[in-house]
Image (spheres, helix red, strand yellow):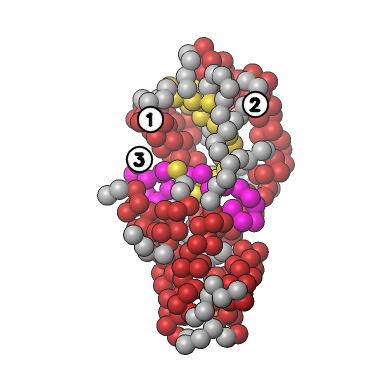
Amino acid sequence: MGFFDSLKKGLEKTRKGFTEKIEQLIIGYAEIDDEFLDDLEALLLTADVGVPTTNRLMSDVRQGIKNRSINSPEDLRPFLKNRIREILTNDASLPSAAAGPQVMMIVGVNGVGKTTTIGKLSHYYKENGEKVLVAAGDTFRAAAIEQLEIWARRTGSELIKHTEGADPAAVAFDAVQAAKARKVDRLIIDTAGRLHTKSNLMEELKKIHRVIGREIPGAPHETLLVLDATTGQNAINQAKLFGEATNVTGVVLTKLDGTAKGGVVVAIKHELGLPVKWIGVGEGMNDLRPFQAEDFAEALFGDK
């Protein structure tokens, strides 16, 4: 099964709660009237698209009706598909290192799949011919270090670790030195699963960020926030708080296959301006892939 097929299968629950309901709405109305628009608005909200994004889409729909882009309920499906694709299209290219290793810092709360994400990212980059080094910066849990060791062995990546309870910034410092000395292509730094309400832990994230930046100007080149799609709108709140603590450059959205709340992808991009860089639609090694707006829109609406 190719990744598009996995994506389409993974979005099945969201499609049933969103696209199929849109189609039922279209069948139920002969023309677009106020009642139709009210039902559409309610449908968008229940798909976890969020209030601000729903308001934007409804405004677009009304404008489409006004300028005759939408003339009947049947025109709504392709219109919404195109608008969602446009919202999700990432304009900015990936930041890159001028010289030396590309440094990625991975942040997020406990339980979202951070360690697994790092393992799958390592696999992806190794498959693309890169030399990868992973830093076990979550020193609060011995299990986190052990899990990364297992992933490093599975993917053939190198690992820098300290003992449980060590200073995470010291792990990051040693990892940066090792990455430069060993001439690796990519350094991926894990961090402890943060309770986003704990300001002292957020300060520690800032410290790690500063340590990395002192050793490699401009690093970390990417700070990826891992979010669990099944939490829906709570993921938006997490993203806002992490954005205040560190310069989040993009989102990894995991567990899309386990939720009907896939509309949160649109809300993250529209409300926060944060691009979704990676999506996970399964537990397999290859089930985490770079996000493509066109493929997501096609899969969400069950096309291709």
Residue sitting nearer the eye, 69 or 137: 69
Residue tagged by mark 1?
128
280 within the magenta span: yes
Location of residue 203 (image quadrant): top right
Between the residue at mark 3 and the residue at mark 1, the CA separation in whole angstroms equals 14 Å
Residue type pointed to by label 2: Gly
Q: Farthest top residue?
A: 181
Image point 58% across, 22% down: which residue? 98
Image point 37% across, 64% down: which residue? 302
Residue type pointed to by label 3: Met
Residue tagged by mark 2?
218
Disc number for residue 285:
3
Magenta residues, start to end: 269-289
Please state, as top left, top right, bottom left or bottom right, where the C terminus lies in the image.
bottom left
Q: Secondary structure at mark 2?
A: loop
Q: Secondary structure at mark 1?
A: loop
Residue 182 drawn at (x, y percent) = 48, 13
- Residues packed near mark 2 inside 10 Å, few (<14), some (14 to 19) or many (20 plus): some
Residue 103 drawn at (x, y percent) = 55, 27
Q: Is 203 placed left or right of 139 in the picture?
A: right
Q: Farthest left residue?
A: 1
Q: Farthest bottom residue?
A: 30
